[in-house]
Amino acid sequence: MKITPEKVQELAALSRLRFEGEAAEKMRQDLENILEMCEKLNEVNTDDVEPLIYMTDRVNNLRDDKVTQEISHEEALKNAPKKDSDFFRVPKVIGQTD
Amino acid sequence: MSTEFEAVIGLEIHIQLLTESKAFSSDSTAYGQMPNTQVSAVSLGHPGTLPKHNRHAVELAMKMGLALQCGITRINRYARKNYFYADLPKGYQITQFDTPLCTGGFVSIKPKSGEPKQVRLIRIHMEEDTGKSMHDQDLEDSLIDYNRAGTPLIEVVTEPDIRTGEEAYAFVTEIRRLVRYLDICDGNMEEGSLRCDANISIRPKGTSAFGTKVEVKNMNSISNVKRAIDFEIKRQTEVLQNGGVVIGETRGFNGLNGSTFSMRRKELVNDYRYFPEPDLPPLTLTDKDIEAVKHSMPELPEALFNRFHQELGLSEYDAAVLTDDKTTAMYFNHLIQCTSNYKAAANWVNVAIKGYLNENAVGMESFPLQPEKIADIISVIDQNIVSHSAAAQHLFPAMIANPHATAVELIEKLNLAQDADTDTIENLIAEVLSRFPEKVQEYKNGKTGLLGLFVGEVMKASKGKADPRKTNEQVRKMLDA
């Protein structure tokens, strides 16, 4: 499968990554190689095979609606690169929410 | 040349489910707590953690689907919706993609103007809420509070069946009434527990192709949903009439001036790269599970309306007012267990009680009298112990002031007993007639409409204690004598 330079930029935007110049071309080739390798799988006939999503046959892993607070406010914020006493702080981003 | 346009509107309604704990972890869902105090390793999206679905959230979601006549999906898979945003710590939202819990179904609406109609639903699926970002508290940073992250939601998606802001208003009102009846959400749009996005496009009337759609967000009340849609229809119509093109975009709503504003273009189709969530095994539902939820559901407003209207013989208007909110409907339902005078019961609730609530600006849940007490009042009127007007003007307020006293006790205390003594009434009538000799003459000359005036004066003189029907008879008898 062909990967166009535009596709690389589209995927980069979705992943919040940036590739330019040679790096973009290298990424494009890598992606193409990966997909080519995966295309090998198309040689197998999977007409009557259900897609495998789960590794077990287990269903309905449900819990009761009980509140237990497992971590403290301080523990919650502990690993944040930037924080104050109340909030996680992130670089300002407006207009990209969904 | 002026083309006539019609709007094509579909709504997406997010409903926070009233569970104690989150959808996939055990931290609390309570609103208004200190930031980042109701979080867990799961809701913060730490690696290596595993979600586990809240059974109660599934039950509440099924209630909504069953109430709206949806089909319930037996084998449910969860999916990951991938996008990067700071209030979504995992980088994906757990939702349902190809197997929504509920499919089809409809909502019957009665817009204020226009015809009643059914708005069809595409689906209702289960998902989780995000955290909250605050952009205007700090110059450099956005502040993130994850207390809301992982709160269970359902999203109701309609077919594009809505044509006007008025219909959208009626639709969201009906959804809010239903979630409150079902007790699955508090329906509070200001606090965001019920949220509505609208997809709006317009097209020349009579055509069937869809125009370019615009999504409007941030409408935090039902009347704002209507205002935003009305504004957007007018804006898009003007764009087209001036030879322009409508741009596909997401717009926000400014409640201060009722306008919408561009938030971002939808040039790149959002690519959420949905795929099955491998951390959650499928959810399978049996007929028995569905029956169990059905049995736990309360009587819905439409059923109550039909019962009040058809079985109890109340007017459509009375039945509609009584079923408008659940507390009132349940109060009335209790009241009719205590009295068989259904019409009087409806009147007391819709007139006297509603009046009291309006005057005091409180809701039905704050009304101090038990339904038994209202039945007590109805009973003393039906036994002619007290006149209706004396009951409404004096007994009812006295009961509210003394919620534990009985009607008979207060009638005695306030000397409200109806004066059935014919002599007393005759004396009062004679007195009134002597005060209005000219009117009496006019009456005798054929102006019989004056009867009401005399009866009114007698009632006044008796301080409301005279029985109006008897007074009426007696006044006529004495005038005709």
Image (cartoon, grey):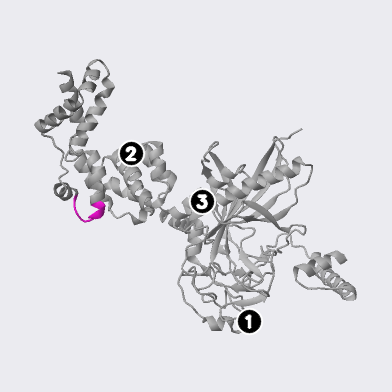
**Disc 2 and disc 1: Cα gap in Å?**
63 Å
Amino acid type at circle 2 is Leu
Vertical placement of residue B89 versus B108, above or below: below
Q: Earlier in the sequence, mark 2 or mark 3?
A: 3
**Residue A68 location, x and y as percent?**
47, 76
Residue B475 visible in this rendered orientation of the protein: yes
Q: Residue at x 67, y 67 (%)?
A: A52
| Nearer the observer, B395 or B4 | B395
Q: Main secondary structure of the magenta part?
A: loop
Magenta-span inclusion, residue B401: yes
Are labels 2 and 3 assigned to the same chain? yes
The residue under label 1 is: A80
Which region is colored magenta? B399-406
* Eye-nearest disc, 3 or 1: 1
Chain under disc 3: B
Query: Residue B94 sits in which quadrant?
Result: bottom right
Tell whether B379 sits left or right of B360. Answer: left
Q: Secondary structure at mark 3?
A: helix
Tell whether B293 sits left or right of B272. Answer: left
* Image mark for residue B312: 2
Amino acid type at circle 3 is Ile
**Disc 3 and disc 1: Cα gap in Å?**
39 Å
Are labels 3 and 1 assigned to the same chain? no
Vertical placement of residue B76 versus B278, above or below: above
| Nearer the observer, B308 or A93 | A93
Magenta-span inclusion, residue B246: no
Q: Residue at x 36, y 41 (%)?
A: B308
Chain under disc 2: B
The residue under label 3 is: B175
